[in-house]
């Protein structure tokens, strides 16, 4: 799938449990914020439909994972 | 392709009970990955946007930046809380991404980058900042036009 596909928030949460234990995912007005190890990625789109489990562009998940310093682990869990 | 960008934006943001002007002089990194263009925040970091063209990615990046400010405003009970969270946002930088931005600046300075003729050049050593001011007396003199430049 590479970075052109999509990943569900549920899949992201599951991968974060392994790669960034203790990471906090918070729903804001337009985004989910993910905080881990003193850094907050503020750019996961919350989606327009329901917001409980949005599909998120895998490239954004890759940027988030790199920002939080857990890219290799997340790539082993997700197609990003 | 990796282009180091400097961007300036001046936004008017409404919160519950306050109106604020947010002026940023920041850094971003424009890349092309698997045929898609990405603009990633460097300073402030922690957000990114993509597009089919570099112009589309830049447009989406500016929209995402505004949306993050609106997220912050929606949660801020006061101007002071809004200002403090905006500063946290500005200070959230990834050293890895900043390193890539600096490496891209060196490539621009070496003269090997030729995909950026559409951007004006600005010194990569330009100061970065994010200033939040309460707006008590609206004035046309506060309006500023945003711009994007190639960091060189």
Image (cartoon, rainbow, N blue to C red):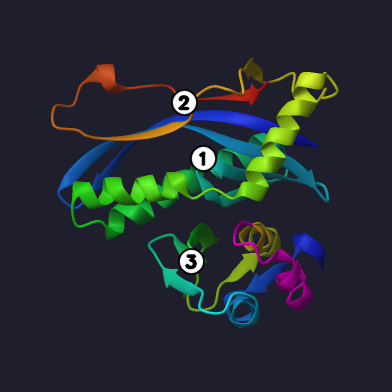
Q: Quadrant of residue B119?
A: top right
The reply to whether the C-beta atoms of the residues labelled 2 and 3 are less than 8 Å apart is no
In this view, which residue lies farthest toward the right? B112
* Side (left or right) of B145 relative to B21: right
* Side (left or right) of A13 relative to B92: right
Query: Does the rendering let one see residue A46?
Result: no
In the depicted view, which residue is nearer to us: B121 or B109?
A: B109
Which residue sits at x=54%, y=48%? B93
In the depicted view, which residue is nearer to us: B108 or B62?
A: B108
- Is B28 in the magenta? no
The reply to whether the C-beta atoms of the residues labelled 3 and 1 are less than 8 Å apart is no
x and y, in percent, of residue B136 in the image: 13, 32
- For the C terminus of chain A, which image quadrant? bottom right
Residue identifier under label 1: B62
The reply to whether the C-beta atoms of the residues labelled 1 and 2 are less than 8 Å apart is yes
Between disc 1 and disc 2, whose residue precedes?
1
Badge 3 and badge 1 both on one subunit:
no
Vertical side of B33 occupied by A5: above or below: below
- For the N terminus of chain A, which image quadrant? bottom right
Residue identifier under label 3: A35
x and y, in percent, of residue B34 in the image: 83, 51
Which residue sits at x=45%, y=46%? B91
x and y, in percent, of residue B118 in the image: 70, 20
Alpha carbon separation for disc pair 1 and 2: 10 Å
Q: Chain of mark 3?
A: A
Which residue sits at x=79%, y=27%? B107
Magenta-tinted stretch: A67-80
Which numbered dot is residue B146? 2
Vertical side of A64 occupied by B90: above or below: above
* Side (left or right) of A41 relative to A78: left
């Amino acid at each position: 799938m590479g970075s052109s596909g999509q990943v569900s928030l549920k899949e992201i949460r599951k991968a974060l449990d392994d790669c960034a234990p203790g990471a906090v995912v918070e729903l804001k007005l337009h985004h989910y914020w993910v905080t881990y190890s003193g850094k907050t990625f503020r750019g996961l789109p919350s989606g327009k439909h329901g917001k409980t489990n949005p599909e998120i562009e895998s490239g954004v998940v890759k940027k988030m994972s790199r920002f939080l310093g857990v890219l290799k682990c997340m790539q082993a869990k997700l197609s990003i | 392709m990796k282009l180091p960008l400097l961007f300036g934006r001046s936004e008017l943001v409404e919160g519950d009970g306050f109106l604020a002007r947010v002026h940023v002089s920041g850094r971003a990194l424009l890349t092309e990955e698997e045929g898609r263009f990405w603009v990633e925040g460097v300073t402030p970091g922690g957000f990114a946007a993509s597009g089919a063209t570099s112009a589309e990615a830049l447009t989406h990046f500016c929209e995402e930046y505004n949306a993050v400010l609106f997220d912050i405003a929606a949660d801020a009970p006061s101007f002071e809380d809004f200002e403090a969270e905006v500063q946290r946002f500005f200070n959230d930088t990834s050293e890895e991404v900043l390193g890539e931005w600096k490496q891209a600046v060196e490539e621009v300075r070496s003269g090997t980058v030729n995909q950026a003729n559409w951007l004006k050049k600005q010194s990569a050593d330009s100061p970065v900042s994010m200033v939040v001011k309460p707006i008590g007396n609206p004035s046309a003199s506060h309006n500023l036009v945003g711009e994007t430049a190639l960091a060189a």
